Amino acid sequence: MFTCRYIRQSLTCKPMGEKNKKISYRKFRLLAIFLLKEYKLDKKYINRIFNRIEIDPVTRCWNSTYASNSWGYAKIGIKSKVLAVHRIMYEYIHGTIPSDKPFILHRCDNPKCCNPTHLYSGTPQNNVDDMINRNRYPDQKGETNYGAKLTEKQVKEIRASNKPQPILAKQFNVVRQTISNIKTRRRWKHLP
């Protein structure tokens, strides 16, 4: 628990696991001043952010327990705006996010982490390269593609069939062009 003279309020940061690792008072005070100055936040917002951070003693990640979006990034609602917690923490340490590198990337590969030492700015290309290098890019071939309407078994059946394309399209509930693309191997190229 910290008591900051600047905001005259006690704040806590919950540790994860058995070891009690806390954010240093100096870092906390600087963050409190930054949040008050940059986002013009009241004491209650600073308390909200710090009460919802759990520190992992193994990875040293500051895991935010706020609700996350579909990609796993923690979000906080502040004054009618929804902000990403990791972006607030990045700005705290490094200043404003550069316009030529608008993405905030994680060294730890943990989207809930908001430890400023685990964050760095990058370009959209850096973000894609990082995703591919860490094998976070989902395999989009065949049935694993979210838009796939056919199975591999059905595609093999279509290729082996001698029926006219309009009849196959009706049988498999797809358009004729899909059947044509499968037969000419413009789609489902990975299958023999």
Image (cartoon, rainbow, N blue to C red):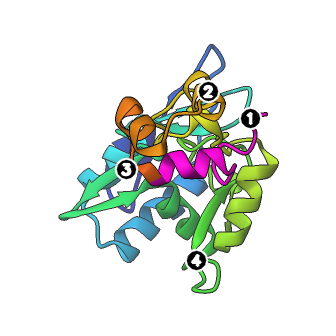
Q: Are marks 3 and 2 in contact (CB under 8 Å)?
A: no
Give the number of the mark in front: 4 or 2. 2
Residue density around tag 1, few if under 14, some if 14–19, many if 20 or more, within 10 Å:
few
Residue 24 at least partly seen: no
Say which residue appears at 53% left-offset and 63% top-offset: 30
Q: Secondary structure at mark 2?
A: helix
Which quadrant is the C terminus positioned in?
A: top right
Tag of residue 95: 4
Residue named by callout 1? 191
Earlier sequence position, callout 1 versus callout 4? 4
Q: Amino acid at mark 3?
A: Lys
Q: Are marks 2 and 1 in contact (CB under 8 Å)?
A: yes
Q: Amino acid at mark 2?
A: Glu
Q: For the residues marked 3 and 4, what is the alpha-carbon distance in whole angstroms?
A: 20 Å
Q: Are marks 3 and 4 in contact (CB under 8 Å)?
A: no
Say which residue appears at 69% left-offset and 27% top-offset: 57
Tag of residue 152: 2
- Work out whether 63 lies above or below 88: above
Q: Which residues are magenta?
A: 177-192
Q: Amino acid at mark 4?
A: Gly
Residue 181 forms part of the magenta stretch = yes
Q: Position of residue 52 (x, y in %)?
A: 40, 37
Please state if 76 lies on the left or on the right of 80 as rendered.
right
Give the number of the mark in front: 1 or 4. 1
Say which residue appears at 76% left-offset and 51% top-offset: 132
Give the number of the mark in front: 1 or 3. 1
